[in-house]
């Protein structure tokens, strides 16, 4: 009887150890499935102001840098949620400058196409404008301070985002469109297009 109990106890402990190893491997697999993306982007910011029936557009061009992390969602389908932070500086006519910090959150789906993966995504981003100004004939105008009775622009904006990543090995190309959900100023929207190159680690 003692021998039988000893054998059963040893067998039970082996099963416990096996389950612990499997659990550890599962956890490690989940952690390794997380991906961090670093990117540098060409950014085009279109400021569109409605004046009566006409639409006046100023295109500002510049660069963005950003980092984000994608984590798998529970379930069998390859869905991920991605969050990160970007810094953008764009420049336009009349020595216009806009510097912004952007916090994107999106839902992403993975499509395997052989050696290339496509990652379409959609979500929201919160934009905080740090600096916005124009210089004309030696006079600097701050967009976020009311001047001569004009209303100031909003420092915070909520935007949507739609895009896709094309991943090869550890490198990726990304195209993203960020339309305004809230205005930059009265009757004025800011829509952003980013074309990015980056790598994963």
Image (cartoon, helix red, strand yellow):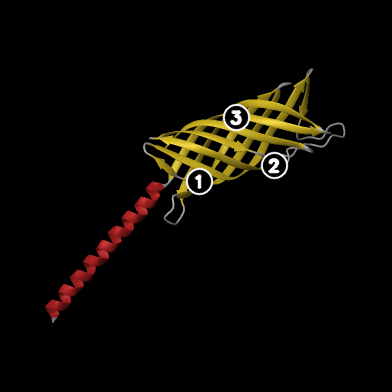
Q: Residue at x 69, y 42 (%)?
A: 156
Given the current orientation, which residue lies at the most extreme right position? Answer: 149
- The circle on residue 156 is 2
Residue 25 position (above or below residue 141): below
18 displayed left or right of 41: left
Q: Quadrant of the C terminus?
A: top left
Residue 139 position (above or below residue 13): above
Given the current orientation, which residue lies at the most extreme bottom position? Answer: 1
- Which mark lies nearer to you, 1 or 2? 1
Q: Quadrant of the N terminus?
A: bottom left
The answer to whether mark 2 and mark 3 are in CB contact below 8 A is: no
186 displayed left or right of 191: right
Marks 2/3: CA–CA distance: 18 Å
Q: Mark 1 Cα within 10 Å, few/some/many (few <14, many 20+)?
A: many
Residue named by callout 1? 108
> Secondary structure under badge 3?
strand
Asked which quadrant contains residue 87, the reply is: top right
Asked which quadrant contains residue 183, the reply is: top right
Mark closest to the chain's N terminus, 1 or 2: 1
The answer to whether mark 1 and mark 2 are in CB contact below 8 A is: no
The answer to whether mark 3 and mark 1 are in CB contact below 8 A is: no
Q: Mark 3 Cα within 10 Å, few/some/many (few <14, many 20+)?
A: many
159 displayed left or right of 7: right
Residue named by callout 3? 43
Across and down, in percent, residue 120 comes to 51, 42
Q: Mark 2 Cα within 10 Å, few/some/many (few <14, many 20+)?
A: some
């Amino acid at each position: 009887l003692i021998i039988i109990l000893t054998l059963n106890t040893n067998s039970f402990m082996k099963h416990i150890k096996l389950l612990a190893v499997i659990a550890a491997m599962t956890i490690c697999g989940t952690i390794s499935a997380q991906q961090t993306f670093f990117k540098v982007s060409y950014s085009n910011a279109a400021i569109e102001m409605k004046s009566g029936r006409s639409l006046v557009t100023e295109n500002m061009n510049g660069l963005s840098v950003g980092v984000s992390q994608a984590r798998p969602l529970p379930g069998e389908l390859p869905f991920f949620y991605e969050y990160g932070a970007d810094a953008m500086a764009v420049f336009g006519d009349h020595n216009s400058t806009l510097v912004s910090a952007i916090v994107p959150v999106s839902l992403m789906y993975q499509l395997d196409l052989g050696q290339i993966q496509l990652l379409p995504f959609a979500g929201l981003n919160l934009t905080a404008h740090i600096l916005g100004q124009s210089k004309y004939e030696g006079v600097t105008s701050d967009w976020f301070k009311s001047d001569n009775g004009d209303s100031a622009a909003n420092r915070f904006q909520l935007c949507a985002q739609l895009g896709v990543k094309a991943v090869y090995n550890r490198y990726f190309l990304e195209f993203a469109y960020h339309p305004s959900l809230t205005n930059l100023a009265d009757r004025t929207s800011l829509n952003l297009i980013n074309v990015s190159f980056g790598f994963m680690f």
